[in-house]
Amino acid sequence: MKKGIILTFAFLNVTLSIAQEKLVGSWSLVSIDNIYPDSSRVHPYGENPKGLLIFDANGNYAIQILKAVRSKIVSGDKNTCTAEENATLVQGSNSHFGKYEMDEEHKIMVFKIESASFPNWEGTTQKRSYIRTENEIKYVVTNTTQGGQSIIAEVVWRKL
């Protein structure tokens, strides 16, 4: 019995490693759409957002997302921004990093967020359904609110 449990665990570990291995590397952001309850779509980071997602073989990940078009800080010093400039900086970017796991059978990607530009996400675990092709991955974020409304975010990345 013990041998069967060990073999099953080893098989699950290999399966997880294969799913993770497919993701290892750098991914460029293609698009982000926020989908509202009325089915309308908004591009929160503009038409051509910039972003980088990195997965490593040890289960670590890092995401950086930026609006493609961002205003410069008038003073040239990010520590002396106006309140409006600060709001624009915060709303025009999103980053977080931590550990990831893949559930290939159920097509679920799990982000265990250690640190984030949005501090409410720190220490949380987020499960995201995904679809993967050879060079692209699209996942869905369902635990997001904007303007008091629950929204769904579709995020598409392309392998570099």
Image (tube, grey):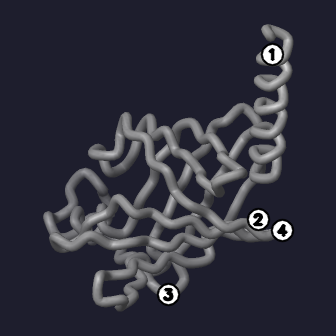
The spot of residue 146 in percent (x, y) is 24, 70
- Give the residue at x 60% y 53%: 108
How far is the residue under mark 2 from the one under mark 1? 35 Å
Residue type at the position of mark 1: Ile
Where on the picture, by quarter, is residue 43?
bottom left
Mark toward the start of the polypeptide (4 vs 2): 4
Q: Name the residue under label 4.
A: 134
Question: Which residue type does callout 4 highlight?
Answer: Glu
- Whole-percent x, y for residue 91 in the image: 30, 67
Q: Which of marks 3 and 2 is nearer the N terminus?
A: 3
Counting residues from the start of the chain, the first of labels 3 and 1 encountered is 1
User: Residue 121 sits in which quadrant?
Assistant: top left
Q: Kindly identify which residue carries mark 3.
A: 47
Tags 4 and 2 in contact by the CB under 8 Å rule? yes
Determine the CA span between mark 3 and mark 1.
Answer: 49 Å
Kind of residue indicated by mark 3: Glu
- Measuring from the top left, give residue 48's x and y in whole percent: 54, 83
Q: Name the residue under label 2.
A: 159
Secondary structure beneath dot 3 equals loop
